[in-house]
Amino acid sequence: MAPVRPAASSPILVVEDDADARAALIDILEISGFPAVPAGNGREALDYLRRSSTPSCIILDLMMPEMNGWEFRAAQKNDPTIASVPVIVVSAFGGATIDADEILVKPIDVDQLLKIVGNYAASERSE
Amino acid sequence: MSDTGNVAAGIEAEIEALEQREASAELRGDIAELERLWSEDLLANSTSKIIAGKETLLNLIRAGRLRLLRFERRTVRCVKQEDLAIATGNETSEIAIDPPVGTFFCSYMNIWKRQNGQWKLLGRHVGLISRSDQPS
């Protein structure tokens, strides 16, 4: 079995409207030692961020109902209490233009995603 | 049937048997059998828009996060060249999850490679064709 990484002290917020994709991401993060919480769109993600502890990073889909990824990102950057949370965008569009810390194109390479998430969790632990 | 036809039929039967053996192991969550049948370099591209390797997939099964209530595979066509074989067709599946998410009907393609005399699943792609809201 692959080594399980030490759990991050803060969860990873997974913002994805596709229930299957969201569940798969959360399952993979959790079995890899990263606690994760779901949000079905940008509005739910903002609500979570404003009432809960700060996540170590956010995995953000772009095309979502109610509040899409671009709208979420604009709102996040305008709120100083959550603006600094790192954002990993996962997009079906190779040429997606959005200000984010990382941009991954779907389908997501799990190994690549876990490496990025692990780096953010490690930097959080070292602070 | 010509000799060529017999050879082709023999290859198809061998690959088809592998396909059913692997599908049965997935349905039962048989880790030991999947360990034997899957290449260490397995890459799978799933309907969840995720590319995962052998260890991630096995860990999901071990953790009970990928448990199938139903899994039926129908191989429509296969081809073999030397130590590579490709099989493609369709699969019907139901995942054990609460609340139930219904029945998935997917196309699939599996790539098998013979390594040290054993066929190993090296690549797998699954694409959603349709989905019913209710389990069958």
Image (tube, coloured by chain):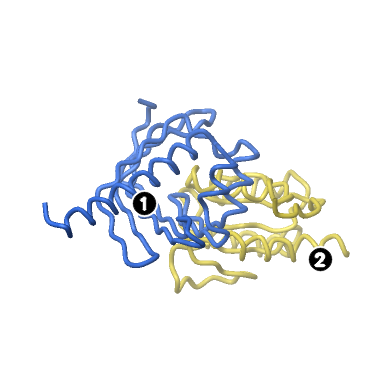
Chain colours: A yellow, B blue
**Residue type pointed to by label 1:** Gly
On the rendered structure, is A44 left or right of A55?
left
Residue that appears at 54% across and 42% down:
B33
Which residue matches tag 1?
Answer: B127
For image coordinates 54% across by 56% down, the residue present is B52
For mark 1, name the chain.
B
Q: Nearer the viewer, residue B97 or A40?
A: B97
Q: Amino acid at mark 2?
A: Ser
- Of circles 2 and 1, which is in front? 1
Q: Quadrant of the C terminus of chain B?
A: top left
Residue under label 2, please give it: A123
Q: Secondary structure at mark 2?
A: helix
User: Relative to residue B81, is residue B70 depicted above or below?
Assistant: above
Q: Within 10 angstroms of label 2, few (less than 14), some, or many (20 or more) residues?
A: few
Q: With respect to residue A92, does A25 lie above or below?
A: above
Q: CA distance from mark 2 to mark 1?
A: 37 Å
Which chain contains the residue that carries disc 2?
Answer: A
Horizontal side, residue B79 vs residue A57: left or right: left
Q: Position of residue B135 (x, y in %)?
A: 39, 27
- Front residue of B59/A43: it is B59
Determine whether B8 is above or below A97 in the image. above
* Residue depicted at 45% across the width and 61% down the height: B114
Check disc 1 and report its element: helix, strand or loop.
strand
The picture places residue B78, in percent across and down from the top left corner, at 28, 55
Q: Do tag 2 and tag 1 residues touch (Cβ < 8 Å)?
A: no
